[in-house]
Image (cartoon, rainbow, N blue to C red):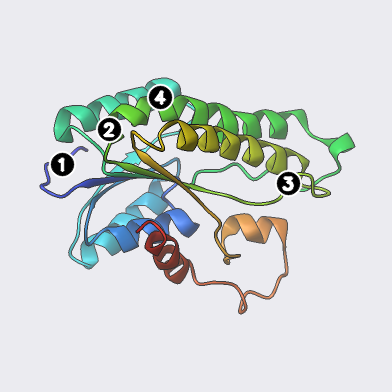
Amino acid sequence: MIQDTPSPVALITGASRGLGAALAEELAPQYHIVAVARTTGALEELDDRIQAAGYSATLAPMDITNPDAMRQLCRSIHDRWGNVALWAHTAVHAAPLTLAAHLDARDWDKSVACNVTATGQLIPFIAPLLGESGQAIFFEDFKAGEKFYSAYGATKAAQIALARSWQAETARTGPRVHIVSPAPMPTATRARFHPGEARDDLADPRAEARRLLSLLG
C-alpha cells in the first residue's frame, strides 16, 4: 500500500534480506523506504523493524522480473511522490555453483532474467524518477571467470556492465550512478556459495551498509 510521506523516497530492490534489508534499515531515518522483494514474510519482518525504530516503509511484494508489475510500481511512485531520491539495486539470482559444462538451463534462464534482463528494464523505468539529482547504487561482485561461478559470474558482470554504461552516460547530467564493492557478509547468498564457512570473520550487514553509504558522499 502506497503511503503519503514528506520524506525523500529510497527504493530498494531486493530488500527482504541481507544487504538490501540492512540498507533499508540504515536509510530509514532519512528516507521513506519502498522495499521490493518476492518474499512477503521477510518484507513484513523488515517493516516491523523499521516501524519499531520509529520510521516508515512501503512494502512492494513483487518479482522484479515481471516488467508489468515494476512498471506499475514506478507509476504509483510517480503519482504519489513524484520522484525517487535513491535507488539501491541489491536483487540477484544466485545460481548453484557448477561446472560451466554442467549448467542447468533453468538456473541459467533465471540468472539472465533477474541479473541482466530485469536490470535492463529497471534502469529505463527508474531513471525518470531519479531525474538529474537522484542517485543509484549497484553492487559489484568479482566472480566473472572464476571456476564454478559461470551463471552467477557472467550475469552479474553483465549487470555491472549495464550500470557502468549508465554511469558514464550520466556523469555530467545526473543521476549519479555508484558502483561499490561490498565486503563478504553472512548472507543467504554467500552461505549458498560457501556452506560451512566460518561466519565470525564476515562483515556485519548493517555495518557494511553504513560503510557503503558513506562512499556516496
Of pointers 1 and 2, the one earlier in the residue sequence: 1
Of pointers 3 and 1, the one earlier in the residue sequence: 1
* Quadrant the N terminus occupies: top left
Q: Measure how far apart labels 1 and 4 are at the Cα level.
A: 24 Å
Is residue 140 shown left or right of residue 36?
right
Of pointers 4 and 2, the one earlier in the residue sequence: 4
- Residue annotated with mark 3: 96
Which dot, 3 or 4, sits closer to the camera? Answer: 4
Q: Position of residue 121 (x, y in %)?
A: 47, 25
Farthest residue toward the top? 68
Q: Residues within 10 Å of mark 3 (few under 14, many from 20)?
A: some
- Residue annotated with mark 1: 3
The local secondary structure at tag 3 comes to loop
* Residues under numbered marks 1 and 2 in contact, where contact means CB atoms less than 8 Å apart: no
Q: Position of residue 57 (x, y in %)?
A: 24, 50
- Residue annotated with mark 2: 131
Q: Measure how far apart labels 3 and 1 are at the Cα level.
A: 38 Å
Q: Position of residue 78 (x, y in %)?
A: 21, 29
Residue 136 visible in rendering: yes
Which dot, 1 or 4, sits closer to the camera? Answer: 4
Between 171 and 110, the one nearer to me in the picture: 171
Of pointers 3 and 2, the one earlier in the residue sequence: 3
Q: Residues within 10 Å of mark 2 (few under 14, many from 20)?
A: some
Rendered position, 213 above or below 119: below
- Specify the quadrant of the image occupied by residue 24: bottom left
Q: Measure how far apart labels 3 and 4 are at the Cα level.
A: 30 Å
- Residue annotated with mark 4: 124
Residue type indicated by callout 3: Pro
The local secondary structure at tag 1 comes to loop
Residue type indicated by callout 1: Gln
